């Protein structure tokens, strides 16, 4: 089946509604270059969510210097997104189709389900932020917020959100590239308005090392680690012989720089705006009222764009789960579910709390999965049997009933290790966190235990499998 309704073009890529789901992308249709990923990710990351993340980080009780340190170190995790973008060009398909190599076609469904929940969570966050921004604009215009207005905004936001994911990969890339510039201009204005108000010593002593670890886990999860499951959904349109260094480099550059700048600005605003800054409207409330309109309008547009990445990936994850849906049908299903979840977040008046808890618990499955995924890729010497990945009823990756048990066991061990070192106070405090007065090692224990366990349990078998089925 052709990728879109029109003929692919070498430079600009296809234009139209993308029909392709998780099926293999032929080499002749791989129009993208590594630099395209820079523009896409930079356009995605330059959005108000990362301003809010920086402000939320300050709510942990850090000094500004501590927050900047955590932002710089935590955002190095974007290298993981670069590394988990290298399998797509080799296999010509999406992340959770490639994941069948390590977990088996049936075993991979469990991880695909976790990923679907994660994507839906981020989509819900985006729609909720859009609705909150819209309500702020109507309040500014003198229109009283009501239940009917909230419902209308939720429905409208969900319907508008359908557009980019329906058109697909190339349209998303081109749109995000265009939207990078207005938000960059907004960022410059915002930074200029902030300079004279920043209070670098608003918190004198800062937080202890235990809280520093919790803050680092928050930054790592909202930056590179939280996006690893999306990387190959977009890099699969790169030619197989694309430079690995260029791919990782462009992805890292397009994510690390905007994320550090925006989180840093969000933290700076929090030094004088206080608890108000931990929301999409609280940021602009610290300035003159004239700034609210351009700030929120550009933010809403940008949020629609970045949410499209999650919605695009979650739709294909539903296909990887084995549901008999086209990519377009999957997008519709996800949109309805996200609209309902967003309604709950809005009417429960607990958006910030839900956001923090959601982000902290993501790491429990993402950290070990990322390690297993990368270790498997290295063990098989960066080679995949492209057509075998598309099979769900047999083949070299089917193994024991479609489940590769060493990967499942390593995932469970990694999740247990992550959960036992997680601090999600007040709802969950792990034994390790309790014994260390609130330290959070969950990111590191998950990555380490998941990766090492898979290496020990599956190393020999995967190496033999790769050598036996080398092209």
Image (cartoon, helix red, strand yellow):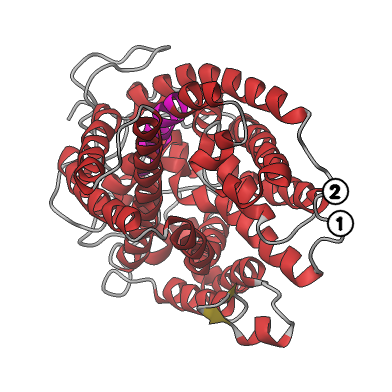
Which residue is rendered at x = 30% and y = 63% of the image?
Answer: 109
Q: Quadrant of residue 81?
A: top right
Magenta-highlighted residues: 297-310
- Mark seen at residue 292: none
Do the residues bearing badges 2 and 1 touch, measured as CB atoms within 8 Å? yes
Say which quadrant the N terminus sits in: top left
The spot of residue 381 in percent (x, y) is: 56, 51
Seen at 27% across and 53% down, the residue is 343
Whether residue 468 is visible here, answered yes or no, is yes
Can the viewer see residue 385 in this picture? no
User: Which structural element holds mark 1?
Assistant: loop
Quarter of the figure with the C terminus: top left
Which of the 4 quarters of the picture holds residue 221? bottom right
Q: Residue 201's mark?
A: 2
Q: Main secondary structure of the magenta part?
A: helix
Query: Does residue 330 sit above or below 216 in this rendering?
Result: above
- In the picture of the structure, the residue carrying the numbered disc 1 is 204
Q: Looking at the picture, how far across and down is residue 153, in whole percent?
A: 25, 38
């Amino acid at each position: 089946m052709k990728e879109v309704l029109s003929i692919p073009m070498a430079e600009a890529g296809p234009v139209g509604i993308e029909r392709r789901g998780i099926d293999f992308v032929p080499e002749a249709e791989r129009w993208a270059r590594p630099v395209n990923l820079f523009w896409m990710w930079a356009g995605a990351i330059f959005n108000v969510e990362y301003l809010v993340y920086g402000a939320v980080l300050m709510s942990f009780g850090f000094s500004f210097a501590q927050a900047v340190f955590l932002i710089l170190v935590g955002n190095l995790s974007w290298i993981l997104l670069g590394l988990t973008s290298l399998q797509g060009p080799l296999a010509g398909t999406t992340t959770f189709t490639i994941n069948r190599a390590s977990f088996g076609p049936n075993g991979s469904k469990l991880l695909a389900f976790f990923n679907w929940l994660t994507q839906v969570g981020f989509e819900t966050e985006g729609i909720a932020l859009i609705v909150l921004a819209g309500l702020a604009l109507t309040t500014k215009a003198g229109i009283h917020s009501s239940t009917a207005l909230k419902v209308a905004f939720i429905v409208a936001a969900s319907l508008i959100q359908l557009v980019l994911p329906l058109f697909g990969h190339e349209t998303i890339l081109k749109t995000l590239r265009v939207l990078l510039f207005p938000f960059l201009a907004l960022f410059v204005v915002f930074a200029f308005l902030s300079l004279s108000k920043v209070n670098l010593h608003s918190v004198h002593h800062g937080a202890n090392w235990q809280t520093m670890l919790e803050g680092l886990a928050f930054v790592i999860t909202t930056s590179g680690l939280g996006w690893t499951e999306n990387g190959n959904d977009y890099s699969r349109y790169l030619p197989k012989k694309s430079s690995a260094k260029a791919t990782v480099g462009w992805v890292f550059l397009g994510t690390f720089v905007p994320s550090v700048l925006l989180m840093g600005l969000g933290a700076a605003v929090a030094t004088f705006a206080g608890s108000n800054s931990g929301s999409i409207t609280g940021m602009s409330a610290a300035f003159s009222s004239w700034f609210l309109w351009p700030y929120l309008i550009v933010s809403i547009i940008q949020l629609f764009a970045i949410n499209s990445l999650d919605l695009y990936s979650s739709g294909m994850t539903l296909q990887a789960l084995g549901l008999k849906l086209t990519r377009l049908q999957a997008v519709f299903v996800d949109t309805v579910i996200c609209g309902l979840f967003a309604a709950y977040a809005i009417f429960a008046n607990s958006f910030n709390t839900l956001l923090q808890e959601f982000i902290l618990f993501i790491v429990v499955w993402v950290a070990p999965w990322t390690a297993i995924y990368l270790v498997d890729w290295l063990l098989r010497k960066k080679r995949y049997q492209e057509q075998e990945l598309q099979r769900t009823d047999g083949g070299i990756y089917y193994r024991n009933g479609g489940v590769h048990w060493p990967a499942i066991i390593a995932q469970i061990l990694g999740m247990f290790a992550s959960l036992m070192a997680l601090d999600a106070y007040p709802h969950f405090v792990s034994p390790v966190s309790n014994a260390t007065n609130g330290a959070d090692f969950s990111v590191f224990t998950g990555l380490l235990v998941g990766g090492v366990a898979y290496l020990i349990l599956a190393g020999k078998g995967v190496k033999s499998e790769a050598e036996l089925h080398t092209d």
